[in-house]
Image: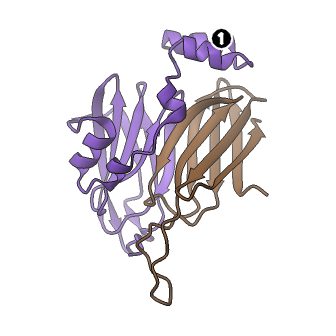
């Protein structure tokens, strides 16, 4: 286990935790006061969205990312997706390649491992999970077939 | 009354947090039955806290499904106070918390 994490857990989550965590460099001001990344959500392609959200778009395929999503989504309005990363993820971006604006959500992982949510898909396409870890991007994708599109437009 | 449901269950040093937030998540593209555009109304930010410390921040677009579901695993122990708060594009906010079992 990473030394910072061990220290954090050892100290427990008492009242002075914020000060301890900040000192330990675990919490940057950005984590708690992040600005909503409007431009990234307006991005019309995967690369544009990634560049705007994470400052880069080149990502290496990684088997350390587990992306769970249904093979077939009967209702494109509610597609469950779960992303787990074996290492320490700093941020995770979830994109639906076939949507007009591919970026659906962006997570500042902080101390969290694994995220699961439900997204809207307009049509059959790849769902792409991009993990930012120590300044590098890793990705994996899965094709999800959509029988009834769910973007409501 | 808060429109946020939270389940926080601990196993050793890890808490699995599951939350469901009631919200229309309108993109601003859809129209109602009269043909009028429904204004954009969606949660933009969700923060998960453990004993007052933010441990996960999620930025959502309207492409997150209506009544957003979010699940995550965070470090913590039984008895920790897990809080979920959100803010939407219209400036509304909500917050709820539970004690991890």
Return the x and y of residue A28 as percentages of the image width and height: 49, 23
User: Residue visible at 67% across and 24% down?
Assistant: B12
Residue B70 or residue A105, whichever sits in front: A105
Look at chain B in the picture and name its colour: brown
Residue A82 or residue A17, whichever sits in front: A17
Badge 1, how many Cα within 10 Å: few under 14, some, many 20+? few
Return the x and y of residue A60 as percentages of the image width and height: 22, 33
B86 sits left or right of B61 in the view: right
Return the x and y of residue B56 as percentages of the image width and height: 55, 35
Give the colour scheme shown: by chain
Q: In the picture, which quadrant includes the C terminus of chain A?
A: bottom left
Q: Quadrant of residue A67?
A: top left
User: Residue visible at 48% across and 33% down?
Assistant: A109
Relative vertical location of residue A129 with respect to residue A136 in this rendering, above or below:
below
Look at chain A in the picture and name its colour: purple
Q: Which secondary structure, mark 1?
A: helix
User: Residue visible at 66% across and 43% down?
Assistant: B84
How many circles with numbers are drawn on the protein? 1
A96 sits left or right of A107 in the view: left
Question: In the rendered structure, the residue with mark 1 lies on which chain?
Answer: A
Return the x and y of residue B92 as percentages of the image width and height: 63, 56
Can residue A125 be seen at all in this image of the molecule? yes
User: Residue visible at 62% across and 13% down?
Assistant: A20
Q: Quadrant of residue A21?
A: top right
> What residue is shown with label 1?
A10
**Residue extending furthest front?**
B91
**Residue extending furthest bottom?**
B34
Can residue A112 be seen at all in this image of the molecule? no
A78 sits left or right of A134 in the view: right
Q: Quadrant of residue B78?
A: top right
A18 sits left or right of A114 in the view: right
Residue B76 or residue A152, whichever sits in front: A152
């Amino acid at each position: 286990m990473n030394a910072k994490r061990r220290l954090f857990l050892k100290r427990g989550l008492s009242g002075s935790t914020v000060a301890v965590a900040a000192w330990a460099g675990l919490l940057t001001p950005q984590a708690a006061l992040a600005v909503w990344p409007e431009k990234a959500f307006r991005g019309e392609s995967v690369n544009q969205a990634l560049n705007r959200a994470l400052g880069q778009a080149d990502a290496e395929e990684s088997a350390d990312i587990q992306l769970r999503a249904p093979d077939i989504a009967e209702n494109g309005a509610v597609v469950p997706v779960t992303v787990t990363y074996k290492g320490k993820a700093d941020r995770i971006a979830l994109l639906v390649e076939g949507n007009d604006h591919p970026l659906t959500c962006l997570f500042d992982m902080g101390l969290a491992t694994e995220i699961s949510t439900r997204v809207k898909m307009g049509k059959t396409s790849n769902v792409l999970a991009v993990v930012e870890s120590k300044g590098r991007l890793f990705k994996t994708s899965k094709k999800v077939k959509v029988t009834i599109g769910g973007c409501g437009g | 009354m808060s429109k946020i449901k939270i389940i926080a269950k601990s196993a050793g040093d890890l808490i699995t947090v599951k939350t469901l937030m009631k919200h229309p998540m309108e993109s601003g593209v859809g129209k109602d039955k009269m043909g009028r555009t429904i204004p954009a109304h969606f949660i933009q930010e969700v923060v998960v806290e453990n004993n007052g410390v933010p441990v996960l921040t999620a930025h959502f677009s309207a492409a997150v499904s209506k009544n957003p579901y979010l699940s995550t695993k965070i470090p913590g122990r039984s008895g920790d106070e897990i809080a979920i708060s959100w803010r939407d594009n219209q400036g509304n906010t909500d917050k709820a918390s539970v004690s991890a079992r």
